Amino acid sequence: MAGEEFKPRDPNWDAKVRASFARQTFMKTIDARLVTVAPGYCEIELPFREDLCQQHGFLHGGVVTAIAANAGGYAAFTLMPPGTSVVGVEYKLNLFSSPKGERVIARGRVLRPGKTLHVVQAELDAWQDGEWKPFGRMLATMMAAQGIPEVGVRA
Amino acid sequence: MSEFKPRDPDWDKKVRDSFARQTVMTTIGARIAALRPGYCEIELPFRRDLCQQHGFLHAGITTTIADSAAGYAAFSLMPSGASVLTVEFKVNLMAPAAGDVFMGRGRVIKPGRTLLAVEADVIARGPDGEKSVAQMLATMMCLADKADAPVGE
């Protein structure tokens, strides 16, 4: 599994990811939870909520994008040097089916850690009938930004 | 701008009804600001409980209004009795989503029978004017025999 081949450049990688995640008010708003953090890897889980849905009663594509982008972004952030901040540059999401079930999970993995840009992917699975069923996949680019304080600009 | 001819005379109402069923739009405080055949604009005032770690609007929220704007631009051109579904999208995040109000503007590029190519941009409006913060290119699917409203409604 998870990126054990990656060496974090920041000894504080675990704490800084958890602290950054905790500052994301939107994650609190939707009850998303950081499940696993490892070098180059991050899992975020989201329980189904009726107030986060699209017109057919499934979780909105933007909401699952939020946890996929975060799982990918924080997987990248574990490998970024001290003093940098993680910023999403772009992503592509394919949705295979509507996420059914009581909760969904995003598993973010670093594919290639660069100096400035990190290529990551995130798998989206829904817990359905006792197993995780894939319903989406993201490919994304994350940037290690210099000079943006990780702690709240507007906070 | 509206060179498109809707195939459903009920296009305006069906889009607004479908939008009203998207519970997440109510949750985040988004509303339809403009709607024309092949075009949809969704407005969202900034809220502190929808932010990422730097205090800007979360990219997932930016994507949420872009996706719905794109999807409803497409839905406005779909025939009666059909339903809209997002197949895929690509988003470029061009600037931190800082501003007081955000506008997702979706427009149809090519309305196919089954697949519709659409684009959406998100504009942030603040004291210093307007700024483009995100751009989306997406594929929407027309499900011909699936009612847009959940069964029983």
Image: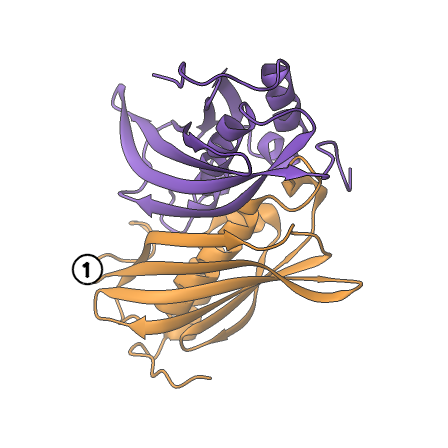
Chain colours: A purple, B orange
Front position in the image: B61 or A129: B61
Pick out the residue farthest to the front: A115
Horizontal side of A121 relative to A31 (left or right) equals left
Residue at position x 32%, y 39% in the image = A136
Considering only vertical position in the picture, is A55 above or below A127? below
Image quadrant containing the N terminus of chain A? top left
- Mark 1 neighbour class, 10 Å CA radius: few under 14, some 14 to 19, many 20 or more: few
Residue at position x 65%, y 51% in the image = B97
Measured as percent of width and height from the top left, residue B98 is found at: 70, 52
Q: Which residue is mark 1?
A: B145
Give amino acid for label 1: Asp
Task: Specify the quadrant of the image occupied by residue A4.
Answer: top left
Image quadrant containing the C terminus of chain A? top right
Measured as percent of width and height from the top left, residue B26 is found at: 56, 50
Measured as percent of width and height from the top left, residue B140 is found at: 32, 60
Measured as percent of width and height from the top left, residue A130 is found at: 26, 18
Residue at position x 33%, y 66% in the image = B117
Is residue A69 visible in the rendered image? The answer is: yes
Front position in the image: B15 or B46: B46
Task: Specify the quadrant of the image occupied by residue B84.
Answer: bottom left
Q: Secondary structure at mark 1?
A: loop
